[in-house]
Amino acid sequence: MGIIENSFKRELGKNTGKVVSNLLFGDKHSTPYRRVDSTKAKEVDAKIEKQQKEQLFAIDNAVLKNIDAVAAFRISNKKDELLQQLSELSVQLKANRWHETFNNEEGKIRNKFTDALFEKYKQCVHTLKAIDSEEPQLPYFQNIVKKTYWRKYIRTYPTIIGFVSFFSIIGIIAWIDSLNKSEQQILLISFLTIVAIVCALLIYFKFRKKTISNPKNDKVVITQEENKNETIKNEIQSSIFIDLNENNRIENKLSAIWTRYKNHVNKNVIGRIPIFSADGVTESILFVGINPSYNPNDDNLFIKGENNNSLMYGSLYQLPDAPEYFKNLEVFAHKIGKSYTHINLLYVRENDRELLSQFDSNFIREQLELTYETIIKINPVAIIFFSDYCKELIFGADRWINPNTEIDGSYILNGTKYPVFFSDDITLMEEDEQMSLIQKIKLRIQR
C-alpha cells in the first residue's frame, strides 16, 4: 500500500461547484419581472447584468484558487505514489468535464480549471514514463490522455462541430445530386465495395484471433497457473504463514475504535472503512509503513471483513504475480536470508499527513496499540519503519522506541528484543545504500 505525501486534496473543484450552485444562473432564466415602463425595465436589466458580472467574477476567483492548488500539487518521483496520484487525477478528470464555450462565459471560466487538471495529469504520465517505461499500467494512463483530448474538443466545441458536420453532409448530398446517374452508380458501387472489404477484414482478423488462441487451451493454462499459485501459497501457509486476524481479532477491534471515535474525527475520514494486512510470516523482516492511502476503488478491490466494517489483504510473499513493489521487499529480505511481512502502523485511510497528525490522539493511540499486538504475534527478527512520520509517532523515552536503546544506528522495541531500524523506503534506495542497511541488520541479528 503506497503512502502519498502532500497528496492532491479532494476538495479541488468543490469551491467552484459551491459558487455555481449558490450564485450562478439559479434564477437568471426563470425569474419573471413586470415591465412597468421602459425606464424601470432598463434599471432591472442593468441590475441583472451587474449581478451576472459579480457572479462570474466570484466563479473566476474560485477557479483561480483551484488552479493554484493544481499548480502546487507535487508530482511524486516514487512510482507507487505516482500511480496512486494518477488514479486520483483520473477520477478528478472524469468529475470535472469541459463545458461548451460558444456564447458561454461561465464555460470558458470553468474550463480553465479542467485545462490545468489535464495538464497536471499529462505531466504525471510523462514522469511515470521517465521512471519506468515498462510499467504495465503506463499504456492505460496514456490511453486516458488520448481519449481526454477527444472529449475536450467535443465538449468544448459541440455547436461548431455540429454546424460543420451538418453543412458537410449537405455539401456531400449536393455533390452527389450533381452527378449523373452513371457517376452515382459508380460512387455507390465504390462505397459498397469499401464497406464490404472493411467488414471482411474485421471478420477475418476476429476469426484469425480465435484460431490462434484456442479458448479451451487458454482455459487450461489459466487454470493451471492459478492452481500453481494457489499450491505455492498453500505450501507456504502450511509452514510459515500466520493468521494475523485470527478469531477476527483485528477487524473487531477496528470496528470498536471506529465506532468510539465516529463523532471525534473528521467525518469524511472516519467514514472510510479501515484496511489491514490479514497475513504475516513468522520470524521475518517486518516492513512497516505509516498508513494505507485512500483510493475509493479499494472498497471494491479488497476483501471485506465478516462485519463489513473493514477491508483486508493477504500476504504476497513468494507469489509469482506479486506487484513489483512487494517483489523488491522480498528480494531485500532474501539478501538477509529471511522472509518478509508488510503492515502499516495505522489503519485509517488518508493521504494528507498534516491532517493525520491533527486527529484525536486517543484515536491514533488505540490503533498503535493494536499494531503493537500484531507485531508481537508476527515475532519478527527485525523491524524496519519507513518514513519520518513513523518515527514521530513511536520514538521517545515514553513511547515504543527508547532513544537510549540505540546500538550502531538501531534500537529495541520496548518490551521485546526486536531490533528496530528507521529508514527511507528501501525500494527507492541506491544499491550501495541497501547493502549498507542489509549489513547493519545482519550484524544486529547475529548479536
Image (tube, grey):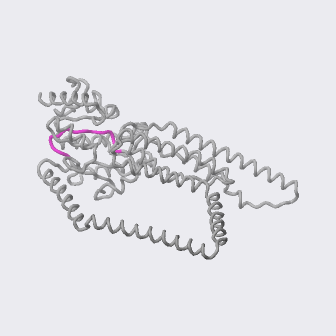
Look at 83% across and 51% down and name the residue there. 43
Look at 36% across and 65% down and name the residue there. 205
Camera-side residue of 198 and 416? 198
Q: Is residue 362 visible?
A: no
Estimate the x, y position of residue 293 in percent, counting from the top left.
37, 45
In the rendered view, tell whether residue 138 sits above or below residue 213: above
Look at 50% across and 73% down and name the residue there. 192
Camera-side residue of 154 and 406? 154
Left or right, 50 with reference to 431: right
> Which residue appears farthest toward the front when viewing the image?
182
Estimate the x, y position of residue 148 in percent, counting from the top left.
50, 52
Left or right, 84 with reference to 171: left
The stretch of residues the image draws in magenta is 280-292
Count the labels in the image: 0
Image-quadrant location for residue 399: top left
Estimate the x, y position of residue 61 in percent, counting from the top left.
62, 41
Estimate the x, y position of residue 96 in percent, counting from the top left.
53, 51
The C terminus lies in which quarter of the figure?
top left
Q: Is residue 297 visible?
A: yes
In the rendered view, tell whether residue 352 sits above or below residue 197: above
Is 289 within the magenta? yes
Camera-side residue of 176 and 30? 176
Is 397 within the magenta? no
The N terminus lies in which quarter of the figure?
top left
